[in-house]
Image (tube, helix red, strand yellow):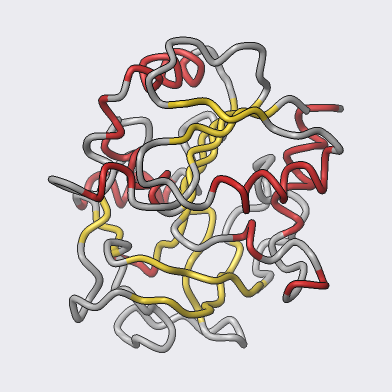
Amino acid sequence: MKAGIVVFPGTNRERDMGHALKLVSGHTPKMIWHRETSLGDVDLVVLPGGFSFGDYLRSGAMAAHSPILREVKAFAEKGGYVLGVCNGFQTLTEAHLLPGALLRNAGLRFLSQDCHLKVENSSSSYTHHWKKGDVFRAPLAHGDGNYTASPDILKKLEEEERVAFRYCRSDGTISHEDRASNPNGSLNSIAGILSENRRVCGLMPHPENLVDAEIGGVDGLPLFKGLVEALVG
């Protein structure tokens, strides 16, 4: 699997993501600077976490207008796989590759903690190593992770089963208004969504930080294993 990780000024999770991808694929991903105008020969593009351009204006807003994003959009339109995590998810919504927006967390506090996610759709390459209803742990670290969308978009996401992950308690219980279950206040407890063709995925928590038992656990490993299977065959 040939992966490329896009790096913006302020990105700080590219090495974590690179470690996760190399662990499952055996290949070192290439780092793609945001001012480049070609992705090169890649199977997967990843927009990692961090604070691109210092989160100036809105998180991901300036990154969405970087030269490389034109290539990412074209890649996605041709059916390419694109994963956005945390700031990457914010950038995907700002670039209109995924619907909705990420607002300030409920309570207006930056959150840095573990959370639990329930798998809502196991039919995508990102999720098929889980079963629907599975619960796993993932770290989160963001100030603008409160997912929102218009009622029509929200209805479409739910009807088309494009919600990939929801925030929940460790036992899988979901309560949209309970901060212990839904820490940032996201609508319908949404933590991650998929594009219509299920090849673009965005989520706020960081599965790449739980792929190695020696540094905390392997809860996030199924996401990356699924991608390798989809892209290597």
Image coordinates for residue 15, horizontal then vertical, percent: 61, 48
Task: Give the residue displayed 75% in from the left and 58% down from the top.
Answer: 221
Outermost residue on the left side: it is: 57
Residue 72 location in percent, x, y? 45, 21
Q: Residue at x 66, y 72 (%)?
A: 136
Q: Does residue 93 lie above or below 173 as drawn?
A: above
Residue at (47% x, 80% y) in the render: 113
For the N terminus, the image quarter is top right
Q: Name which quarter of the figure residue 94 lies in.
A: top left
Residue nearer the viewer, 145 or 212: 212
Report the residue at 67% width, 51% height from top.
127
Q: Is residue 186 left or right of residue 202?
A: left
Q: Position of residue 53 (x, y in %)?
A: 27, 42
In the displayed image of the protein, which residue is found farthest to the front? 9
Out of 164 and 137, give the one closest to the viewer: 137
Total label count? 0
Q: Position of residue 123 (x, y in %)?
A: 67, 45
Residue 29 location, quadrant? top right
Q: Which quadrant of the rendered structure holds the C terminus?
A: top right
Is 88 rendered above or below residue 169? above
In depth, the one of 188 and 41 nearer the eye is 41
